[in-house]
Image: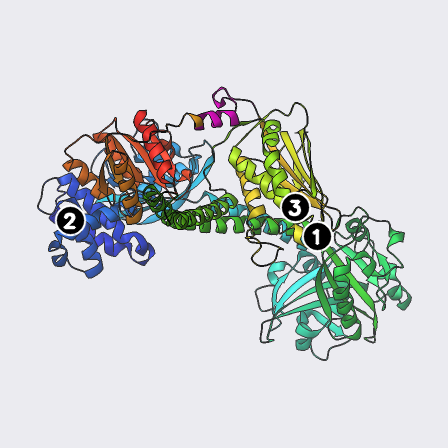
């Protein structure tokens, strides 16, 4: 098949048009990749690979090819940039020919290896995709997609596959045929990981099914109507009472007023739809009359316009019964409707006293029937919510509002404070006079916990994104500031008048570095260096610093447990956790007190749930940090680990201390809980997983100290270094610093320039120092290309992000090291010395 630029150009132009708006975001990139592959496969030619990429970009954007052919010089960089951007796409792309058997893959993006497991030596192919499929239906769907693409039809579907970890995952697969002269030349395959969306949809469907089942099987009828009174929904109970199927009611313009036989407080059926909230008679499909009580709530927009209503329907008596029977509470509220109802129900008199309640209401409170009946409902509600409940009940009794919906916390004997949704409405007699109030209560505690967990995870995710972006850009600036300060200090000694000013610059840059680290700690994206650590020894060493920090008015007590075992943590980060909590304890004891640090071994036999955290069973080392200070108010307990939350005066703290503690402990695999009461002090409980000592740890903290001692004092060296950094200031500092240490330094501002410098280098390059994230060709791609040309070259990767930005195959490759930003002149020189020395 002819793959020259002229031959393939019509197909690519048709593909760019065919992608249309639905693939608008990637159409140009796809076309560019296809043209680049075609040109590279054809070989030779005046335009070349990068020029072909720009041809399709110009053709897609401007509708013609003449302009692109005249801009060969710009084509090189643009083509490589588009290719790099396409290769970094989270979705995978395959371009597969249809003429060859087996189908030949002309292009495969890097994401393919992430979405489909590849063994060593294997290359991306449709057979790899097919072998990963799970279940017969997925195979049939895949074959159908393949047939559609080869037949010139676009199609997409979702299939089950076996993921890299062996579990089942979902992939959305799309096919786009590439044609020439009405013949399909090749098929562009698109693969997207939709596992997370599928799981969310399954969870949502499950929750919706539970909610629908709950509403359908309530002991009361329920319906929702639009502003025009037409039914939007009616539950199964109401349908059964009326003797009709659900499909006959909702979505067909039916009104509940169409079933009303008589009303005690409305003049027309149209008014009843929206405004009625009392007793009325409904006529069933069989002609029977059902006497019901309707409790209705209205939902309006900001302008006061009615949007929809929600109504609870409770039968009071069957038509034709005697007045005595109708007045009987037991007859109007049969056992299945009141006592056995799955929701809590309470009947109140005009003064808010509980006249009667069912078993579900008692289960919510956890107390006996006699402890509720004859007492005000307000006694069962937390004090903070009592005023709101009293005000709403008063409005209901006075007729200001027909019904009310409230969310309150209840007081229980077990000191549990369930969150309860209360629906309250009037009880009217036949003359429309108010007899009392009926209250329906639903325990929504679990739902609120789930909402809090979701909100917390969203906050962590958003702060994580913020921290990552801030860290990368800010760490580049800090690297340059600290580095040039170090260069100045080499020329201005302590006797120089400028020495103090330079030290102030460096000191404040280091403070800014710690602030970035705190953000990364909360988002759990910092670079940790865990070792096996003996907490008894670590806390004993730290106690000297703690005594200076907390002052003479506070007594420090250390209570060490026996046989604690070993934990695997970053010693520096662990010290920061203890110091932060000790400083908080000091601030909570302005008049003095005692700070106790207690350790013990704990075996958790079953999962422990505390708030939104669930700690699995296992062996833990518990560190308790206890103060005798003023305590934390109950309303602040749930917010103390949130970033930037602080009860201190403005200017006295960043609000990141406890969020840093939380982030470090969670990233280490542990858990942190807090117990506090106003005026009774605070206890922070830190659970760290117990770990077996590893042979390579060499004693944890002691090993770190010894390693620091063997760092060479002479940081000079010889050799040729290629420094690749897109930030000019960082590159200038690094080059000057390394030249001052005796190295020959070659500079490049990006990956493309680095390859050019390598080709023109007159001497052997011993070490490559490259930033990970750069425009165009990133550091990972550059290192792969460099290692093909120079397999023995040593590499140091630098980044303002955490070390986790390195893929596994790069991070664990021998000869590749990582230096996080910001780094000082000494950090850079020491790392280079160590790597060059092997």
701 magenta-colored: yes
Q: Which badge, 2 or 1, is on the more N-terminal residue?
A: 2
Towards the viewer: 200 or 137: 200
Where residue 593 sits in the image (x, y, percent)? 72, 44
Q: Quadrant of the C terminus?
A: top left
Chain part drawn in magenta: 692-708
Where residue 330 sits in the image (x, y, percent)? 87, 58
Contact between labelled residues 1 and 2, with CB atoms less than 8 Å apart = no
In the picture, the disc for residue 51 is 2
- SS at mark 3 in the image: helix
In the picture, the disc for residue 634 is 1
Q: Tell me the CA gap for discs 1 and 3.
A: 20 Å
Work out whether 766 lies above or below 518.
Answer: above
Q: Quadrant of residue 718?
A: top left
Q: Main structural element of the magenta stretch: helix, strand or loop? A: helix
In the picture, the disc for residue 746 is none
> Disc 3 marks which residue?
586
Q: Tell me the CA gap for discs 2 and 3.
A: 67 Å
Q: Tell me the CA gap for discs 2 and 1.
A: 66 Å
For mark 1, does the 10 Å Cα neighbourhood hold few (<14), some (14 to 19), or many (20 or more) residues? few
Q: Which badge, 2 or 3, is on the more N-terminal residue?
A: 2
Work out whether 431 lies above or below 107.
Answer: below
For mark 2, does the 10 Å Cα neighbourhood hold few (<14), some (14 to 19), or many (20 or more) residues? many
């Amino acid at each position: 098949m002819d793959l020259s630029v002229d031959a393939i150009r019509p197909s690519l132009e048709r593909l760019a048009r065919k992608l249309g708006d639905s693939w608008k975001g990637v159409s140009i990139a796809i076309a560019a990749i296809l043209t680049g592959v075609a040109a590279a496969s054809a070989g030779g030619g005046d335009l070349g690979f990068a020029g072909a990429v720009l041809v399709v970009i110009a053709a897609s954007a401007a509708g013609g090819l003449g302009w692109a052919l005249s801009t060969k010089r710009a084509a090189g960089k643009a083509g490589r940039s588009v290719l790099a951007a396409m290769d970094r796409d989270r979705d995978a792309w395959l371009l597969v020919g249809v003429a060859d058997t087996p189908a030949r893959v002309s292009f495969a993006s890097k994401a393919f290896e992430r979405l489909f497991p590849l063994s060593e030596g294997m290359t991306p192919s449709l057979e790899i995709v097919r072998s990963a499929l799970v279940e017969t239906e997925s195979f049939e769907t895949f074959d159908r997609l393949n047939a559609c693409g080869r037949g010139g039809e676009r199609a997409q579907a979702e299939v089950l596959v076996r993921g890299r970890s062996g579990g089942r995952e979902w992939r959305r697969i799309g096919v786009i045929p590439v044609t020439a002269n009405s013949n399909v030349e090749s098929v562009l395959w698109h693969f997207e990981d939709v596992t997370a969306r599928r799981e969310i949809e399954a969870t949502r469907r499950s929750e919706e099914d539970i909610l629908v089942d709950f509403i359908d099987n309530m002991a009361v009828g329920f319906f929702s109507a639009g502003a025009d009174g037409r039914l939007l929904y009616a539950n199964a109970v109401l349908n059964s009472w009326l003797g009709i199927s659900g499909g006959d009611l909702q979505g067909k313009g039916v009104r509940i007023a169409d079933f009303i036989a008589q009303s005690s407080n409305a003049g027309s059926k149209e008014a009843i739809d929206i405004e009625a909230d009392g007793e009325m008679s409904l006529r069933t499909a069989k002609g029977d009359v059902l006497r019901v009580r309707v409790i209705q709530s209205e939902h309006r927009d900001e302008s006061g316009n009615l949007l929809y209503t929600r109504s609870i329907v409770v039968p009071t008596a069957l038509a034709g019964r005697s007045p005595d029977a109708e007045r009987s509470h037991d007859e109007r509220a049969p056992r299945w409707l009141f006592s056995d109802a799955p929701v809590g129900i309470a009947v109140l008199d005009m003064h808010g006293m509980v006249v009667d309640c069912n078993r579900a209401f008692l289960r919510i409170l956890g107390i006996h029937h006699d402890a509720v009946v004859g007492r005000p409902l307000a006694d069962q509600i937390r004090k903070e919510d009592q005023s709101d409940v009293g005000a709403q009940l008063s409005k209901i009794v006075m007729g200001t509002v027909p019904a009310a919906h409230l969310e309150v916390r209840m007081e229980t004997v077990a000191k549990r404070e369930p969150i309860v949704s209360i629906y309250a409405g009037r009880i009217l007699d036949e003359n429309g006079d108010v007899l009392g109030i009926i209250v329906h209560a639903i325990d929504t505690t679990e739902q609120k916990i789930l909402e809090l967990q979701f909100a917390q995870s969203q906050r962590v995710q958003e702060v994580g994104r913020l921290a990552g972006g801030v860290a990368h850009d800010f760490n580049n600036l800090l690297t340059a500031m600290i580095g040039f300060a170090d260069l100045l200090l080499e020329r201005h000694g302590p006797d120089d008048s400028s020495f103090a000013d330079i030290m102030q610059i460096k000191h404040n840059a280091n403070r800014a570095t710690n602030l970035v680290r705190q953000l990364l700690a909360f988002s759990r994206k910092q670079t940790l260096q865990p070792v096996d650590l003996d907490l008894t020894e670590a806390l004993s060493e730290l106690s000297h610093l703690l005594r200076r920090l907390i002052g003479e008015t506070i007594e420090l007590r250390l209570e060490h447990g026996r046989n604690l075992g070993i934990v695997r943590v970053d010693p520096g980060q662990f010290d920061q956790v203890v110091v932060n909590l000790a400083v908080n304890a000091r601030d909570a004891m302005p008049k003095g007190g005692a700070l106790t640090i207690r350790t013990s071994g704990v075996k958790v036999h079953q999962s422990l749930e505390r708030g939104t955290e669930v700690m699995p069973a296992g062996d833990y080392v518990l560190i308790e940090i206890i103060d005798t200070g003023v305590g934390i108010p109950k309303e602040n307990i749930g917010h103390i680990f949130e970033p930037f939350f602080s009860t201190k005066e403005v200017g006295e703290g960043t609000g990141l201390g406890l969020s840093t503690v939380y982030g470090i402990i969670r990233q280490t695999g542990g858990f942190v809980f807090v117990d506090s009461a106003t005026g009774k002090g605070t206890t922070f409980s830190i659970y760290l997983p117990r770990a077996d000592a590893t042979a390579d740890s060499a004693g944890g903290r002691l090993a770190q100290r010894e390693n620091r001692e063997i760092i060479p004092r002479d940081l000079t060296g010889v050799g040729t270094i290629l420094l690749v950094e897109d930030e000019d200031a960082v590159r200038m500092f690094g080059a000057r610093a390394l030249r001052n240490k005796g190295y020959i330094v070659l500079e490049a501002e990006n990956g493309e320039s680095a390859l050019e410098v390598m080709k023109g280098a007159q001497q052997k390059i011993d070490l490559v120092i490259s930033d990970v994230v750069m425009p165009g060709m990133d550091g990972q791609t550059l290192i792969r290309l460099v290692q093909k040309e120079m397999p023995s070259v040593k590499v140091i990767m630098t980044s303002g992000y955490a070390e986790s930005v390195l893929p596994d195959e790069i991070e664990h490759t021998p000869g590749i090291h990582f230096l996080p930003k910001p780094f000082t002149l000494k950090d850079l020189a020491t790392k280079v010395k160590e790597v060059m020395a092997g």
